[in-house]
């Protein structure tokens, strides 16, 4: 959430802008789970799609989108990929693969923020968290998730369609929703004319809030084995929006 920097939207994306893209966060769960339920072999296709798409998306994020980005930083994506491939079962290799996936999510989040009005995108984030919660609580996510997490490309190439870190497993969508909300905050700050220090402070505060909520939410692991990790991000977004709305209402002149 803290990585995306405010960046102007490219002119070419105007042709693709539509509120309908706000469905992408929710559909990223429903469509993937449905496809794996219908055809488990689609998990293999997804792991190759991630293998091909994630590294260049991560390189673009390093070169353009993250704070302090430089064009030369794109080469770091190659180093991360080599580390993830060469040491897939070590914490260093898993951290490299996680970094690649997270950076790719920053690029995807930025593209979505550029093409969707913020109010619709916020609703899309809430819908994603609701669908994720319904799937997890009804045990509809566990089976397809296990198939997707087990899928791996040939030649020991890294699995980038999910996050594996030690004994912890997370879906790609869990990183995506955090990066998406971070991009949303950055874009709103840019549109509102906030200075760079204010933008940095706002995003850092949001990231800290998500971290605190996630740690509190993770206490439920003492009673359950799987949680919808999208929920803390959506709750943080709702709390921040409520705080902004309260400030605006307080600032409005009374008659």
Image (tube, rainbow, N blue to C red):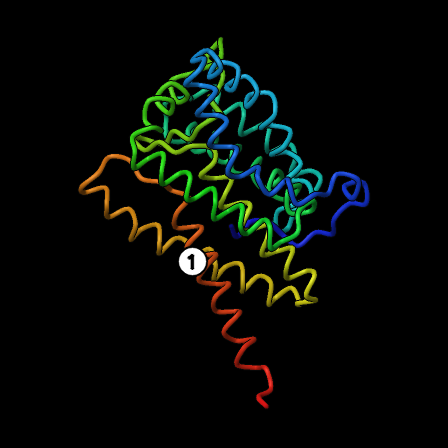
In the rendered image, the residue lying farthest to the bottom is: 255
Question: Which quadrant of the figure contains the C terminus?
Answer: bottom right
Q: Is residue 110 left or right of residue 88?
A: right
Residue at x 69%, y 38% (from the top left corner): 72
Residue at x 46%, y 17% (from the top left corner): 43
Position in image of residue 66 (x %, y %): 61, 47
Q: Is residue 207 left or right of residue 167?
A: right
In the displayed structure, would residue 6 be above or below residue 74? below
In the rendered image, the residue lying farthest to the front is: 255
Taking depth in this image into account, of 199 and 235 the one nearest to the observer is: 235
Q: Is residue 231 left or right of residue 125?
A: left
In the rendered image, the residue lying farthest to the top is: 155
In this figure, which residue is indicated by the disc labeled 1? 208
Residue at x 66%, y 67% (from the top left corner): 194
Position in image of residue 86 (x %, y %): 47, 19
Count every numbered label the image shows and give the total.
Answer: 1
Q: Is residue 247 left or right of residue 218?
A: right
Taking depth in this image into account, of 125 and 167 the one nearest to the observer is: 125
In the displayed structure, would residue 148 be above or below residue 210? above
In the displayed structure, would residue 190 be above or below residue 223? below
Position in image of residue 136 (x %, y %): 33, 35
Taking depth in this image into account, of 226 and 27 the one nearest to the observer is: 27
Badge 1 local density, few (<14 within 10 Å), some, or many (20+)? some
Position in image of residue 197 (x %, y %): 61, 66
Residue at x 35%, y 55% (from the top left corner): 213
Which element is circle 1 on?
helix
């Amino acid at each position: 959430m803290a990585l995306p920097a405010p960046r102007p939207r490219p002119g070419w994306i105007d042709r693709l802008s539509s509120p309908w893209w706000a469905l992408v966060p929710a559909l990223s769960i429903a469509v993937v789970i449905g496809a794996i339920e219908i055809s488990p072999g689609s998990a293999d296709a997804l792991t190759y799609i991630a293998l091909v798409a994630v590294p260049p998306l991560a390189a673009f994020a390093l070169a353009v989108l993250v704070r302090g980005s430089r064009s030369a930083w794109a080469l770091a994506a190659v180093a991360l990929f080599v580390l993830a491939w060469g040491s897939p079962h070590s914490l260093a290799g898993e951290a490299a693969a996680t970094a690649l996936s997270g950076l790719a999510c920053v690029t995807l989040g930025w593209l979505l923020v550029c093409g969707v009005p913020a109010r619709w995108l916020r609703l899309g984030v809430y819908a994603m968290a609701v669908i994720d919660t319904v799937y997890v609580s009804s045990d509809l996510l566990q089976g397809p998730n296990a198939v997707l997490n087990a899928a791996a490309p040939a030649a020991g190439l890294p699995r980038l369609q999910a996050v594996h870190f030690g004994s912890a497993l997370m879906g790609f969508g869990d990183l995506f929703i955090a990066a998406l909300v971070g991009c949303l905050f950055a874009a709103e700050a840019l549109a509102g004319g906030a200075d760079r220090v204010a933008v940095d402070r706002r995003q850092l505060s949001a990231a800290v809030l998500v971290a605190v909520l996630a740690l509190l939410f993770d206490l439920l692991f003492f009673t359950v084995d799987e949680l919808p990790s999208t929920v803390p991000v959506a709750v943080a977004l709702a709390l921040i929006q409520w705080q902004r709305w309260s400030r605006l209402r307080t600032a409005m002149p009374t008659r």
